[in-house]
Amino acid sequence: MTEIKLCPHCGGDRLTVYVDKYDTSYIECADCHAAVLSHVCGCTDGSVSQILDLLIENWNRRAEEEEI
């Protein structure tokens, strides 16, 4: 599993990770409440690990990494 980076807004490390194969999944910072969400309808065949990988990938993305 990929390591989850600290909160991009406050640098906090108190993160809540919630994954639900049939509904909204999220990673949220307990300090500043920044969050990344993923909504999956029940008709998809995505596994919990695939959903978690996508959430972590999106949470870990930083704007300065995308600058050219």
Image: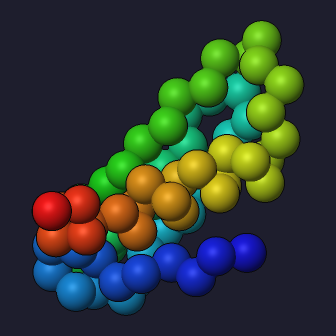
Q: Nearer the viewer, residue 53 or 40?
A: 53
Residue 43 image position (x, y, % from top left)? 77, 11
Judge whether 67 appears above or below 42 on screen.
Answer: below
Q: Residue 9: give x, y in percent of width and height.
A: 15, 73
Taking the view exactly as shown, the residue that stands out farthest to the top is 43
Q: Residue at x 83, y 41 (%)?
A: 47
Q: Residue at x 16, y 70 (%)?
A: 64
Q: How is the image coloured?
A: rainbow
Residue 19 in sight here: no
Query: In this picture, is 10 found above or below 32?
Result: below
The answer to whether residue 52 is visible is yes
Question: In terms of depth relative to the viewer, which is nearer, 57 or 66?
Answer: 66
Which corner quadrant of the image does residue 20 belong to? top right
Count of numbered circles on the image: 0
User: Where does residue 7 sit, x and y in percent of width and height?
Assistant: 29, 76
Residue 23, quarter of picture: top right
Q: Quadrant of residue 68?
A: bottom left
In the picture, measured across the screen, residue 56 lies left or right of residue 60, that is right
Residue 58 horizontal side relative to residue 6, left or right: right
Say left or right for 63 vs 37. Answer: left
**Which quadrant, please, contains the N terminus?**
bottom right
Q: Residue at x 58, y 82 (%)?
A: 3
- Where is residue 25 drawn, in percent x and y? 55, 43
Q: Where is 39 relative to 61, above or below? A: above
